[in-house]
Image (cartoon, grey):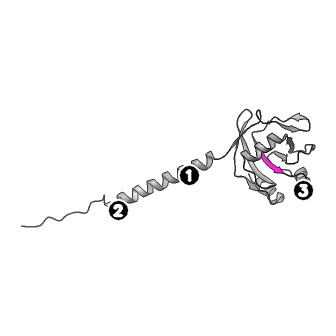
Amino acid sequence: MEKKKRGKSLFTLSTLLASFFGSALIAGAFAYFNYKFSEYKFIDFKEWTFYEKSDIFMPKEKKYIVIFYSSRDRDTQDKLSKIDLNLPIIAIDYYNTVRDNKKKTIFLRSGTKTSLSFIQRFNIYESPSIFFIKRTKDTLYKQDSMIRKLDNLDALASEVKQL
């Protein structure tokens, strides 16, 4: 009598484990990036009052570069006045100095409560700091990038012009 040869199944335990771990890895990556994206904060300019000189600021553009800076740093202040990027800049001064707006730079100031709320909401630890915001609805904007320390305004200019 002839013995029947057992054929190997295409569906082995290693195939099952590989597909399970592959699916788990993809799901984990999706959950992580979804969490990181939800970590970005919102700012509603109807609720938070910022001033351009004595006028209340109301955003008009779809996207802005937000730079939180200290007017006591003359170098940063001068460069912010002269910089020309393809996106408008909202420059928020820690010391609330009144400044004239420039071509693409809007200088804002606010009351102490708004300044502290802004710093806390966006977890700003250093000055100058930079991030991007994008309109989601009317005056509601969502953070569109990580917050990072602005080390070099000249490097920012070449980086943003490529966008």
- Residue at (56%, 52%) from the top-left corner? 32
| Amino acid type indicated by mark 3 | Asp
Q: Are marks 1 and 3 in contact (CB under 8 Å)?
A: no
Does the image show residue 31?
yes
Q: Is residue 101 magenta?
A: no
Q: Which residue is mark 1?
A: 32
| Amino acid type indicated by mark 2 | Ser
- Of the residues under marks 1 and 3, which one precedes in the sequence? 1
Marks 3/2: CA–CA distance: 61 Å
Q: Which residue is mark 2?
A: 14
Is 47 displayed left or right of 81 in the figure?
Answer: left
- Residue at (9%, 67%) from the top-left corner? 2
- Residue at (81%, 36%) from the top-left corner? 49
Marks 1/2: CA–CA distance: 27 Å
- Of the residues under marks 3 and 2, which one precedes in the sequence? 2
Question: Percent position (x, y) of residue 57?
Answer: 84, 36
Question: Percent position (x, y) of residue 51?
Answer: 86, 38
Magenta residues, dominant SS class: strand
- Residue at (86%, 42%) from the top-left corner? 108
Q: Which residue is mark 3?
A: 73
- Of the residues under marks 1 and 2, which one precedes in the sequence? 2
Asked which secondary structure carries label 3, the reply is: loop
Q: Quadrant of the N terminus?
A: bottom left
Q: Which residues are magenta?
A: 60-70
Q: Are marks 1 and 2 in contact (CB under 8 Å)?
A: no
Q: Is residue 62 magenta?
A: yes
Asked which secondary structure carries label 1, the reply is: helix
